[in-house]
Amino acid sequence: MPGNEGENLISESSSKSRSEKSVIDPFSLVSRIKQRGPAPVHLWNPPFCGDMDMLIAKDGSWIHEGRPIRRQAMVNLFAAILRLDDDQHYYLVTPVEKVRIKVEDCPFIVNQMDVNGSGREQVITFTTNTGDIFVVDRKHAVSAKTDLEREAPHPTVHVRNGLKALINRSVFYRLVDLCVENGDHKGSLFGVWSNREFFELGG
């Protein structure tokens, strides 16, 4: 009957709408990952399983269904399976499923910095809020572009596989204190040395 056909179309539409939201429990998702540290998510190609109600806020906090995830160990596990794909969306990825989440700014925050040596031999080591520790070098390059909306610096560093960390204010101020003038380029540049690489922070 015509009426039933209309009801069926509405039912199919509602079903499709519901299917766009992932029903996967995020905590069971990370329970599948047994290793410590970042997982080899770049090697996995699982099917897309929908959107998860999870957000990484500007301050680096992880929020699931409107509630902050307060267990740091759990946050670190989620961070270990985070991936940025070519569509510029962020996903939590396991060998058997992939769910999309939202990120307000950068997924990680640099909140600690250690410095050893000086001049070109200086080595800067960053630690993020999710436990990543790495040396600032060619693979982990610092950038200090300007946030045009706030007219303020937006310093970031590459962590891994396209994922970046925002350098928090206190660390950035310490980084600025290390700035030197580099005359190797046409005109003088101001920035920092790390692992024999120079990173411009502005003039």
Image (tube, rainbow, N blue to C red):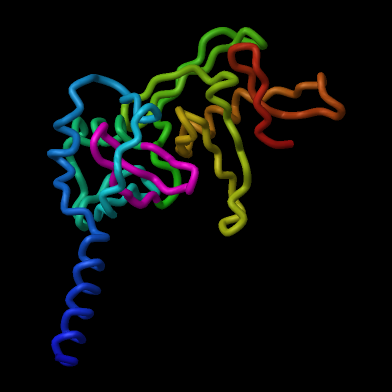
- Give yes or no for residue 168 being in the magenta stretch: no
The image quadrant that residue 31 belongs to is top left
Write the residue at 22% across / 61% down: 19
Place residue 29 in its image quadrant. top left
Camera-nearest residue between 136 and 172:
136
**Which quadrant of the figure contains the N terminus?**
bottom left
From the viewer's perspective, tell me whether residue 140 is left or right of residue 182: left
Splitting the image into 4 quarters, where does residue 120 fall? top right
Q: Residue furthest front?
A: 1
Report whether 39 appears left or right of 145.
Answer: left
Please state which of residues 39 and 146 is positioned toward the viewer in this rendering.
39
Tell me: residue 165, above or below residue 4.
above
Span shown in magenta: 83-103
Q: Position of residue 183 (x, y in %)?
A: 82, 21
Q: Quadrant of the C terminus?
A: top right
Nearer-the-camera pick, 85 or 176: 85
Q: Identify the residue at image location x=14%, y=46%.
A: 25
Q: Which residue: 56% across, 56% down?
A: 150
The residue sitting at 21% across, 65% down in the picture is: 18
> x, y percentage for residue 70?
18, 41
- Residue 57's spot in the image, x, y percent? 35, 50
Q: Residue furthest bottom?
A: 2
Up/down of 185 relative to 70, above or below: above
Count of numbered tags: 0
Horizontal side of residue 186 vs 137, given as left or right: right
Q: Is residue 95 magenta?
A: yes
Q: Is residue 90 above or below residue 130?
A: below
The answer to whether residue 151 is above or below residue 199 is below
Q: Position of residue 115 (x, y in %)?
A: 50, 15
